[in-house]
Image (cartoon, rainbow, N blue to C red):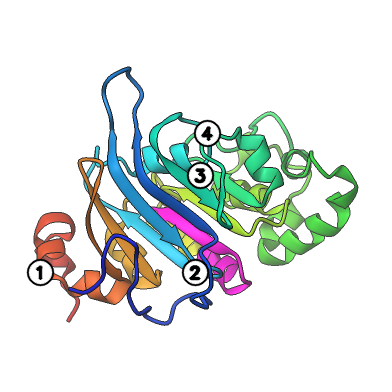
Amino acid sequence: MTGDASGNTPRNGAGNGTGDEAVLVADDLYAGYVPGVDVLRGCSIEVRPGELVGVIGPNGAGKSTLAKAVFGLLRVREGTVRLHGENVTNRPAHELVRRGVGYVPQLANVFPALTVEENLRMGVYLRPKDFAGRAAAVGELFPVLAARRRQKAGSMSGGERQMLAMARALMMEPQVLLLDEPSAGLSPIYQDQVFERVREINGAGVAVLMVEQNARKCLQICARGYVLDQGRNAHTGTGVELLHDQRVIDLYLGTLARVR
């Protein structure tokens, strides 16, 4: 397998990455939830303009911890997070949103007591005058939401709530979107729909960093992938390379995941 921790590998054609200066770089991160105990232990990732990057690994590898640390929801103890070359390590989440970073958490990612429209308004609370235009734009990508704008989010299916969470994150027109386990808990049909929407979002020019438990599907659509293990980079390469790498198959995907 080719490539190194900086992700300097040829892409498989997914996304619109140009090879320009990275949009987002996390370098040698150490972070954790308990004082003195690090979940991330030197993890590094890079997302280039218009690129779709996947992060996979076993349970407890630090995937979701990485997303939280990058987005300022978990304090970074060592290492740096840079956005367009500027150090934004440990900046508050609302500041990163203002700077063009969107984030969709795995759990509690919508306001269930609010309607679809109210959830979308929360997504653009920093620029309320832009609501009408942004709602129309995300409505084209998620037509089911446009048709149900007065429905309470709590009455929607899990897949529909996931779509709403992504739509809300897009209301501020992010340059890079962080997705934490977007297919978790969804039926196979809704998983396919979520992955298709992720591809469409990326195809519109939004760089995406997707932490994902469905490793095989993630690697099929991403330009590059990172495999984490015990808080460190274990493998990196294009999605195609990782899908066919015997070490990744044996350790993380399982023999049934072999792509022929």
Q: Which of marks 4 and 2 is nearer the N terminus?
A: 2
- Look at the numbered disc 1 and give the secondary structure of its residue: helix
Give the residue displayed 43% in from the left and 55% down from the top. 210
Does any portion of residue 239 appear in the rendered image? Answer: yes
Q: Do the residues labelled 3 and 2 touch (CB within 8 Å)?
A: no
Q: Which of marks 3 and 2 is nearer the N terminus?
A: 2
**Amino acid type of the residue that numbered disc 1 sits on in the rendered structure:** Gln
Q: Cα distance, mark 4 to mark 1?
A: 37 Å
**Amino acid type of the residue that numbered disc 3 sits on in the rendered structure:** Gly
Question: Which residue lies under the disc numbered 3?
Answer: 158
Which residue is at the front of the view, 124 or 90?
90
- The label nearer to you, 4 versus 1, is 4
Q: Earlier in the sequence, mark 1 or mark 2?
A: 2
Question: Which residue lies under the disc numbered 4?
Answer: 90
Give the residue displayed 61% in from the left and 32% down from the top. 92
**Amino acid type of the residue that numbered disc 4 sits on in the rendered structure:** Asn
Identify the magenta region: 197-212
Q: Which of marks 1 and 3 is nearer the N terminus?
A: 3
